Image: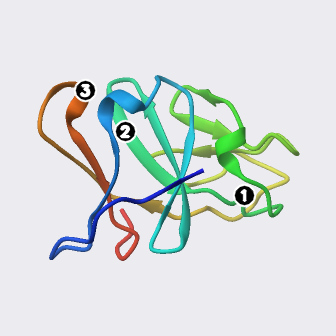
Amino acid sequence: MSTAEGTADTQGFVRVAALGELEEDAPRRVEVDGTPVSLVRTGGEVFAIHDVCSHANVSLSEGEVDDCRIECWLHGSSFDLRTGEPSGPPATRPVPVYPVKIEGDGPDAAVLVSTTQES
């Protein structure tokens, strides 16, 4: 698990990784101001979703990513990375998603996440 680096800017964004550190379709758990977040790079975008399944208290970052969804490894519920909405039972409640900013270019570009505002 990684801990967010640096400090929050004036909009509440915190640097959590370099873009080159994120593998395609491989969730990575970080903490932002004490909030567990799963970072997912997929389809040329980076998403930040709360890292705890709304059905069971397990880490979503241990699940698999497919078609802009992350699957909870324990019971198989999938959550949309854009909205946090579950695809169906057993999960019935969405999980929070957080805004992501990329600053810079290439693999050294900074990935920033804000948990003070939801997307």
The numbered dot on residue 80 is none
Q: Which of labels 1 and 3 is toward the front?
A: 3
The residue shown at (75%, 44%) is 72
Residue 83 in sight: no
Q: Are marks 3 and 2 in contact (CB under 8 Å)?
A: no
Disc 3 to disc 2, how far (Cα)? 13 Å
Relative height, residue 90 to residue 73 (above, below): below
In the rendered structure, the answer to whether residue 106 lies left or right of residue 98 reads left
Return the residue nearer the eye: 12 or 5: 5
Residue 107's disc is: 3
Q: Position of residue 60 (x, y in %)?
A: 68, 48
First in sequence, mark 3 or 2: give its number: 2
Which quadrant of the figure has residue 76?
A: top right
Q: Mark 1: give few (<14), some (14-19) or many (20+) Cα within 10 Å.
A: many
Where does the C terminus fall, quadrant-wise? bottom left
Cα gap from disc 2 to disc 1, whole angstroms? 19 Å
The way the protein has been coloured in the rendering is rainbow
Q: Amino acid at mark 1?
A: Cys
Residue that label 1 marks:
53
Identify which amino acid the numbered label 2 is placed on.
Answer: Val
Location of mark 2 (residue): 46
As drawn, 53 above or below 82: below
Of the residues shown, which amino acid type is indicated by label 3? Pro
Q: Relative to 27, is 113 on the left or the right?
A: left
Judged from the image, the secondary structure of the residue bearing numbered disc 3 is helix
Q: Earlier in the sequence, mark 2 or mark 1?
A: 2
- From the image, state whether disc 3 or disc 2 is nearer to you: 3
Image coords of residue 101 (percent x, y): 23, 50
